[in-house]
Amino acid sequence: MIIGANLPNIPWEDRPEGCNDIVWRYSGNPIIKRNQIPGANSIFNSAVVAKDGAFVGIFRSDDTAMEQHLFLGKSKDAINWEIEHSPLPLYDKDDNCIGVACGYDPRVCFIEDRYYVTWCTQYHGATIGVAYSYDFKKFYRLENAFLPFNRNGVMFPEKIGGRFLMFSRPSDNGHTPFGDMYISQSPDMEFWGYHRFVMNAQGWAWTKIGAGPIPIKTDEGWLLIFHGVGTTCNGMIYSMGAAILDIDEPWKVKYRCKPYIFHPTELYECVGDVPNVTFPCATLTDAATGRIAIYYGAADTVVGLAFTQVDELIKFIKDNKC
Ligand code: BMA
C-alpha cells in the first residue's frame, strides 16, 4: 500500500491481455520524441511531478552539438508534454542569474515546501548538482552535494531522523565499469555526511547499479526502483530492478528482487544513440488505487512510460527475493 497522496488523474493503462510482466508499457510509447523541440538531438532520462492538478517536469535534452541541458516542461495529462525551447536558467541566493542548467539525468523531489532538483553536473568531473524552486518557475542553485566523481543523486521525499537523505553512486570519469549505491545525510541540504552503503552490483546488474525515481513510501518500507547494468560483448544493457528498504534506516535492504522488473526489448529501447537502455528517473503514484506510472529514458534518445501496481510489485519482490 502506498503511503502518500491520491492522484486521480495519474496516466494509466491496464496490463494488456495476455501480458504477464510485472511492469508493462504504455501503448503510445515513446511519449516524447527525440526532436520534439528545435535543435534537439534527443530528449530522454527526465523527471516529472504532479502540481496543482496538472504536471510539470525537468527534461534532459542533448542538442545537435551534443551539449546536455535541462529544460522545463508542462502537461495536462502527463503524456503530452510541452517542453520549453531554451534551457532552464538558474539563480543564486541573491537572485542573480548564474547561467543555464548544464548536465543530465535530473530527478525532482518535493520536500516540505519546495521542489528539489538533483542532476549530474560537471565540477572537474561528474558530480551531483542541486537546485530548488518554490513555484517550479525560478530555480535557485545550491552547492554541489558531493566530490567528483559521482552520479545518480536521488533524494528521499521526506526527512528521516531529522535529516535529508540522498542516494548516490560514486563513479569514474568515463562509462563507469563498477558502482554500488550509497545514502548520504544532511541537516541542511548543504553539508553531506553519515554515508551508508545500501546495495552492491550483483546478479543481472553485475556491472553497476544506481537509484532511479524518488523512492515510494509504502506500508512495507521504501519501494526503490533502480537501474542496473550488465556488460556483454556488445556493450552495456540498462534494465530496471526493485527493492524494499527499511522505513527508518533505508540503507538496510529488506528485500531485493532477483530478476529485473523491466528490460529493453522494444525497438525504441534497443535502437537509438545508446542501444539497450531503459533508465527510470521518475514515477507518479496514486495511493487510492496503488497505481505507479514510471518515466524512463529509452536508448538515450526518447522518453517511455510504463505502469505497475504497488501491491503486485511488492509481492513480486518478496516472492522473488535474492
Ligand atoms: C550513464 C548516463 C545516462 C545514460 C547511460 C547510458 O552513464 O550517461 O545518462 O542513460 O549512461 O548511456
Image (spheres, helix red, strand yellow):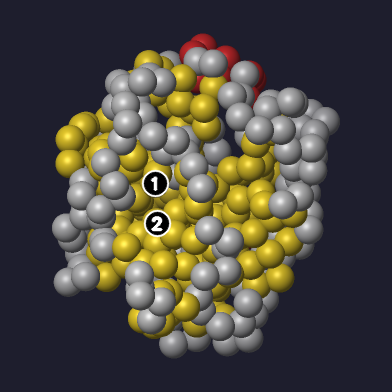
In-image side of 163 versus 118 (left or right): left
Q: Does residue 275 appear in the picture of this structure?
A: no
Few, some or many residues within 10 Å of mark 2 (<14, 14–19, 20+): many
Circle 2: residue type: Thr
- Point out which mark residue 118 bears: 2
Report the quarter where the C terminus lies.
top left
Report the quarter where the N terminus lies.
top right
Residue 256 at x, y percent in the picture: 40, 22
- Point out which mark residue 54 bears: none
Circle 1: residue type: Val
Residue 148 at x, y percent in the picture: 18, 60
Residue appearing at x 26%, y 61% in the figure: 144
Residue appearing at x 31%, y 35% in the figure: 163
Residues under numbered marks 1 and 2 in contact, where contact means CB atoms less than 8 Å apart: yes
Residue 80 at x, y percent in the picture: 76, 62
Q: Which residue is mark 1?
A: 154
Q: Does residue 218 appear in the picture of this structure?
A: yes
Residue 306 at x, y percent in the picture: 66, 43
Compared with 110, 223 (above or below) is above
Residue appearing at x 79%, y 37% in the figure: 8
Residue 30 falls in image quadrant: bottom right
Mark 1 or 2, nearer chain start: 2
Number of marks in the image? 2
In-image side of 180 versus 309 (left or right): left
Q: Residue furthest right?
A: 17
Residue appearing at x 57%, y 87% in the figure: 39
Seen from the viewer's position, the closer of residues 308 and 277 is 308
Instruction: Measure the alpha-carbon separation of dots 1 and 2.
Output: 7 Å
